[in-house]
Amino acid sequence: MVFKNTDDLGSELLSQPNLDKYLKSNQTSFFDWDISELLSRLYEKKNISKASLARCANISEVYLHQVFSGRRIPSRDRLLCICIGLQASSEETQTLLKQAGYAQLYLRHKRDAIIYYGLIHHLSLPEINDQLIFHEEKALI
């Protein structure tokens, strides 16, 4: 199997008049993970209990377990809170957002820039929220 990057897939899609052929020939190139799988992979790399993660992410343990079991799909903001609680790197967070189908943090948006700053400087969720509020942006939770 040949790995195709996003540009290759885009070029092929532009030149392929038949959508079904394109989808069939590239079926191994599409992400088919759900958020619970993606989070579980990231969680396994971290040394934190789910109870502690729930506290750090400012969400209930019940909700967190529902997310990890696939029964609930977190919003982009809640997913960011979980990433912050996991002390995920900016790269891990951006990858998770992208793979989950959410917009990555975009540094030309003031709110996203503040959140990104918090990630790269290892700020806690309350510290990031304080910065968001201080700069007149909506807090994560």
Image (tube, rainbow, N blue to C red):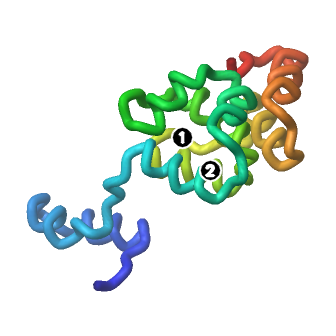
Mark 1 falls on what kind of element?
loop
Quadrant of residue 60 within the rendered picture? top right
Residue 120 x, y percent position in the rendering: 83, 49
Q: Which mark is residue 39?
A: none
Position of 121 compared to 44: left or right?
A: right
Position of 82 compared to 1: left or right?
A: right
Residue placed most toward the observer, 4 or 88: 88
Q: Which mark is residue 94?
A: 2
Is residue 81 visible in the rendered image? The answer is no
Position of 96 compared to 136: left or right?
A: left
Residue 15 x, y percent position in the rendering: 22, 69
Q: Residue at x 68, y 18 (%)?
A: 141
Q: Residue at x 68, y 54 (%)?
A: 46
Three-letter code, disc 1: Ala
* Residue that carries the numbered disc 1 in the rendered image: 103
Q: Which image quadrant: the N terminus?
A: bottom left
Residue 45 x, y percent position in the rendering: 64, 59
Residue 84 x, y percent position in the rendering: 72, 39
Q: CA distance from mark 1 to mark 2?
A: 9 Å
Mark 2 falls on what kind of element?
helix
Q: Residues within 10 Å of mark 1 (few under 14, many from 20)?
A: few
Residue placed most toward the observer, 123 or 4: 123
